[in-house]
Image: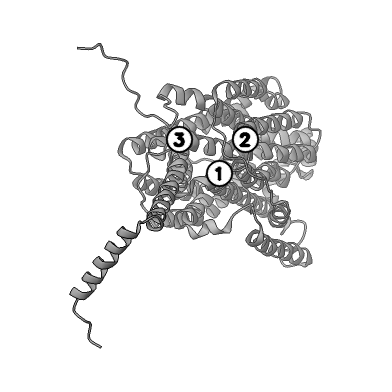
Amino acid sequence: MASSSSPAPAALTESGMTHRQVLEALSGLLLGMFVSMLASTVVSTSLPVIIHDLGGDQAAFTWVVTATLLTTAISTPVWGKLADLVNRKLLFQLAIGIFVVATAAAGFAQNPEWLIAMRAVQGLGAGGLAALSQVIMADIISPRERGRYMGLFGAVMALATIGGPLVGGLITDSLGWRWNFYVALPFAIAALIIVQRTLHLKPFTARKVSIDYLGIILLSTAVSLLLIWVTLAGDSFDWWSIPTLLMVGGAIVAAALFILVELRSREPLVPLSMFRNRTFTLAVLASIATGIAMFGASVFLSQYMQLARGATPTQAGLMTIPMIGGLLVASVGVGQLITRFGHWKPYLIGGGVSLIAGSWLLTTIHYDTNFALVSVYMFLLGAGVGMTMQNLVLIVQNTTEPTKIGVASSGVTFFRSLGGSIGVSVMGAALASQVTDLLGGRKADITAALATLGDQAPTWAQQLQSGSLPQVSAMPDALRVIFEDVYAQGISHSFLILVPFAIMSLIAIVFLPNVPLTRMTNRERLEAGEADLATVSVSEGMETLTATAESPVESDRHRHSDESRAASRPESPR
């Protein structure tokens, strides 16, 4: 008997890659995603401290987050379109570079405006990392096998989301918050080197690049006007006012023009024809709620821990672990189950139910709610995000034409980021309005609390009147209890906005077509399509050649045979 060779790999791509080789190729993508997530999450627990030190208010806090989400959303379809046109590996490296430079520049912020601007540039790179990692993975792994690798992306995201707040809190409490913006630099350099050495992609057939610049401008205008209106309405001007009419009207006009441009563009930013695909349309609807849950929870739960429970940045990072644990367990576990059994819909439905339960339960939290219950609520929300986020991209890739895989993948990511940015803005506006109303109703309590502070009363009164975000953990007990109660009510109220979107997400998931996952990679599907076309063309060509190359004898024989068959058929009634 011949000696046995090494065991056959569990899965092979079109290039004959083993599981280990796939992991090597994905290592740079995973590290790039880790850099993106780490740079974002490392400041999440320190953001209340940062905004306080820079003299910003709740609106500045919201815009620091929204600016990144907005540019991420707008740039994602651009990166996706570029991925269908030019070198994907180079694009991924460029996205890392943009992201890291902007992150480092944010560390020099002296005011909220500079921080918001750099976070906006940061979002341009984040959009590329989010879109391109999914597209590149589709090139080398089939949808059926992609489940367990999607789990790895979920695990990396969970690791960054857990480690980021913890590291950020420790850095803020020891070295100062500015160092949070530099921690991702060594990881970014390593990611660039690893991608260069391990990621080798076969280039697509080169074609002329055409970017829909007018579409980008119109989309940016529409979304920006909408978010600015949501942030300022009810504070800087009334909900029903001339500024509201101008902003909302401008957003509607820009959106209408964007649709017209997309319908006429040769290379549209967001091909509207994709909405004819039922899977894509329903996945987009489901992704909106996922985006709001993922970004909204990370922003406002951090505020809840620090402003409603008096935690330090380090403690806030530790206290959000249950949510990230739910995301990690659900993402990795469901990914493995999808790869093993090939069924995806039951897990997505379970994720939708978990998303609804977690978001609704978080509307019930108070400053003194038992933390064990809060942990359960966070776990359910995290599990809902983990089961739906990556798998919605997976099923869209499974049913999309290979030549449009980039724009389809980025399309889902785009609407997830767009939903997240709008959701965070709306939740932030609701929180600011609710806190203002609640503090107005507690003026007597605040005055009585200040009266008990003696010589410190003028200092705290001046700080409260400044309008900047308070540092609740440093407040005297008499004031802290009031502000913890107010912020807890405001944050729980803001989570009400998430509930209807979570319900919409579940409905969309239920109606998703249950299409089986293919075992072919994107490259294999593309080559198979080309082979089928070639087979049809050759077959039709041979028939044509045969028909035109018949000899006279064969022609006579065929003619007599046809006449005999015609004579033998009964005449049809007239």
Instruction: Say what secondary structure mark 2 lies in.
Output: loop
The residue under label 3 is which amino acid type? Answer: Met
Q: Is residue 112 left or right of residue 133?
A: right
Of the image marks 1 and 3, the number of the one nearer the N terminus: 3
Give the distance between the C-alpha atoms of the residues marked 1 and 2, in whole angstroms.
12 Å
**Callout 3: helix, strand or loop?**
helix
- Locate residue 347 relative to residue 29 in the image: left or right: left
The percent coordinates of residue 30 (x first, y second) are 53, 28
Task: Locate residue 201, reporting x and y percent.
Answer: 54, 30
Q: Quadrant of residue 126?
A: top right
The label on residue 150 is 3
Residue 346, compared with residue 457, is above or below; it is below
Residue 400 visible, this orientation: yes
In the rendered structure, find residue 406 and report the number of the disc placed on it.
1
The CA span between labels 1 and 3 is: 17 Å
Residue hosting label 2: 87
Of callouts 3 and 2, the N-terminal one: 2
Q: Earlier in the sequence, mark 1 or mark 2?
A: 2
Callout 1 touching callout 3 (CB < 8 Å): no
**Image coords of residue 276 (percent x, y):** 49, 60
What's under tag 1, amino acid-wise? Gly
